[in-house]
Image (cartoon, helix red, strand yellow):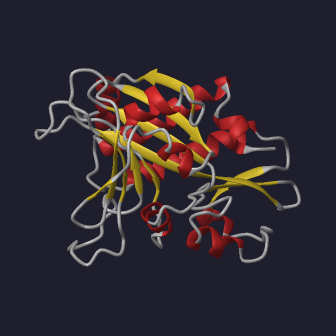
Amino acid sequence: MKLRDILCSGKFENDVKKAVAVSYGTKCVSDINAVGGGLFEIELCKSINKLLPTGYVCLTKRATLSGTYKFPDNFLDTIESDAFHSHSASDLFLFNENNEFLDAVSLKTSMVSPSKNSKKPRPKPCLHNDAKGQIHSAVFNGESCGKVGSVFVVTFDIRLAEVECYYFDRTINDIIRSTPEGYTEGNHQDISFNGESYGKEHRRQVVKVFSRNSKTRKKQTSFTRGIYLDGQFIKKVLVPKGIFENPHSFTLQTREIELQSIRELTLGRR
């Protein structure tokens, strides 16, 4: 059994929609940046468990530490330290009735709000955090850049109320080979690949690999590490090529979610 079979199934779309709505609704009343992603992970985990056979269970990484779950030797340490591990950077873990590990998946979310600095903000989801700079090193040196585990990506363009869900278990090389030209190197040794314009916009960056070893960057943040992709590049290029799957596409009633969140926060006083 694979988590992909549940995450990408048509009957699971409503569960993903609910998880995104919970995540967005909480962000409407909280300024804690990580709260949305955390709630999405928890809600998705609960929904998966409702569909699993008796005895099977899906857990977050933190939850696995509270029980006697059986992983391969050094598994948890290795998935954090090796970007090219078969279950690298996983967030959700599947176990059978004997608490034996079966499968895992990494979750990545990108929620984009209208910005004063951009008339057309676009989702740019992170594919992997690249904790030790392995992806950057491989791309920079022209080496083979393999799989980075299985990744379930969800982008939410709040301006358009559009949600896209993607599943990726191919190689980074597959992505890079889909860009029409070589990369350019930025001031911090960041690597950028350009792609098509997708309409009236100028030719733009579709893949960016941040360098974690730069001595010129003042501070590493969650937005200056790992590999990021342009959402439209995934949708219009990588999905048709079969490099990404696009199992779910839907819209949300954002204003309705916002008002409901306020009603719950104020106990109906507003």
Above or below for 133 versus 256: below
- The picture places residue 84, in percent across and down from the top left corner, at 61, 63
Residue 164 shows in the view: no
Q: Residue at x 45, y 61 (%)?
A: 129
Please tell me in which quadrant of the rendered image residue 101 appears: bottom right
Q: In the depicted view, which residue is nearer to us: 264 or 174?
A: 174
Please tell me in which quadrant of the rendered image residue 213 appears: bottom left
Q: Residue at x 30, y 23 (%)?
A: 160
Q: In the depicted view, which residue is nearer to us: 219 or 159?
A: 219
Q: In the depicted view, which residue is nearer to us: 218 or 38?
A: 218
Q: In the depicted view, which residue is nearer to us: 194 or 12?
A: 194
- The picture places residue 92, in percent across and down from the top left corner, at 63, 54
Q: Residue at x 30, y 70 (%)?
A: 220
Please tell me in which quadrant of the rendered image residue 93 appears: bottom right
Most extreme residue toward the left is 116
Residue 1 located left or right of residue 231: right
- The picture places residue 231, in percent across and down from the top left corner, at 39, 36
Q: Give the quadrant of the C terminus.
A: top left
- The picture places residue 155, in percent across and down from the top left corner, at 42, 37
